[in-house]
Image (tube, rainbow, N blue to C red):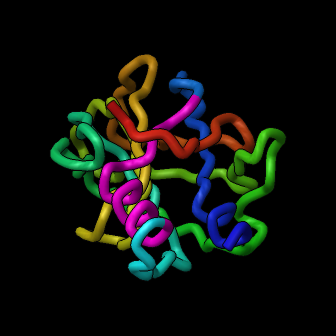
Amino acid sequence: MKKILAGLLLSLALLFPVNAYAGMSAYLAQALGAQFFNGTTYTFPTTIYIGLYTTCPSGGTGGTEASFTGYARVAETVGTTDFTTASGGLVKNAVAISWTNTGSTSQTVTCYGAWDASTGGDQLFENTLTTSQTVNAGATATFAVDALSWQFVISP
C-alpha cells in the first residue's frame, strides 16, 4: 500500500513560477477515505496524465482545461523512473513534461492538474501557478525535473 500511495504522489515543476505544494482533489480524498475507513476498494491508476488549465478548478471540479493546438495531457507511468522519492515522503518528477503550441493563437495558463485518464476522467491533484503564463503560438511550456512536489492535502 505504501508503494502504491507513493506512486500517486506526483511532482512537477514548470519553468515558470508555481506554488510550493499542490493539493489533492476532493475526489481522491473521498476515494482514499472510503478505502481506508470503509474498505471500499479504490483502483489506483497505473498512468497519471498531467494537464494545464486556463481557468483554475476548485477541489478538482470546474475550471477550463487548455485547448491550444497541439495540446494534450501528458502521460506519466506510475511505478517507473518517471518519479523519484524526495525527503519528507514527497515524490518528484524525474523527467521533464512539455507541451508545444503548434497553432497560431496564444493561450494563458493559470493552473495545472493530474488526472487518471487522457481525456475526461477524474482529477487527482491541482495547483495554481504563482504567475499566469502565456503559451504563445510556436512556444513550448515545460515542467522541469525536481522542482515541485504534490502533497496529500485537499486543494481550496
Q: For residue 8: magenta?
A: no
Q: Is residue 35 left or right of residue 93?
A: left
In the image, the segment drawn in magenta is 21-36
What quarter of the picture does the N terminus occupy?
A: bottom right
Q: Is residue 47 above or below residue 115?
A: below
The residue located at (48%, 43%) in the rendering is 140
Report x, y in % for residue 19.
52, 24
**Can residue 132 be seen here?**
yes
Q: Residue at x 43, y 26 (%)?
A: 129
Q: Nearer the viewer, residue 106 or 41?
A: 41
Q: Count every numbered label the image shows and give the total.
A: 0
Is 21 placed left or right of 112 in the picture? right
Percent of width and height locating residue 152? 54, 45
Residue 74, percent across and down?
Answer: 47, 63
Majority secondary structure of the magenta segment? helix
**Residue furthest right in the image:** 87
